Amino acid sequence: MSTGEYLKTAATLTGAAAFTSLANTAIRDHRVWTHRSLDFKNESVGKAARIAGGHLTDTKRWAAVHRVHHSTPDANLTGFVELADYLDWLESPFAHNAGHPEVPDEIHGLDPAVESIDTDTAYEIGSLARELVGGFYQPARDFGVHEGTRILYGDGPRYLYEDLQQMKQDRQDPVRYDPDNLPSLHQIRFLLRDPHSPPLHRMGVLGVMHANVPLYSYAEHNFEDPAFRPD
């Protein structure tokens, strides 16, 4: 085989693999499993799709990540849940809350679309967001004065993704559900934020284009645990 023929064959195989990957993601992962808007009526077609695309992605994990994308578009609800946990703790008769700051009328840095949100609304959002992760995490049992001040008066953005190095470390140590030792809110943050959103990245669209695979991969590694995946 000549060099030209070899390159042509390699290009054909590469194109076929790329097309198979795209079709697998667009049809099987996306339409069949994520949105349930398509089904393979012919069983042999479904089996062929699984054989052709099964080695490319873990469909159930891909679908789980993409469902989070649709439930939290361009949002990171982690800060809202932390605020709701803290405000509930302040009201607890068992809280050692002496010296904690007064609750302000507005909270800054929770949403990329607005500079601040009135505290009652932010609390309501956090309370509703807890329904997405109820039973999956252990709220903090205690808050220090420094933490309370950060939660109530922090003025920097709290919705941004961590840097790639931190994400890489977290990806190597994915969280696992243990009902006897529930993870922290920080550990299950992948359930509360859009996995690839320009407003949540310091570099916007370019940042997500560069980090899209690590961002998706981070969430997908956590979805290895079927306890976190929707049915």
Image (spheres, rainbow, N blue to C red):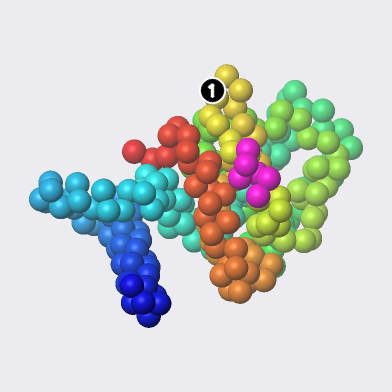
Residue reaching furthest to the left: 42
Residue 131: image x %, image y %? 49, 40
**Does 169 lie within the magenta span?**
yes
Quarter in which the C terminus is drawn: top left
* Residue at 76% in and 48% down: 151
Which residue is drawn at the image coordinates 71% and 53% (left, top)? 165
Read off the residue under disc 1: 179
Task: Left or right? Give the position of 228 relative to 147.
Answer: left
Most extreme residue toward the bottom is 4
The residue segment tinted magenta is 168-173
Q: Nearer the viewer, residue 93 or 50?
A: 50
Where in the figure is residue 98, as x and y percent of width and height?
87, 33
Residue 128 relative to residue 66: left or right: right
Residue 172: percent from left, percent from top: 62, 42
Secondary structure beneath disc 1? loop
In this picture, is 178 found above or below 167?
above
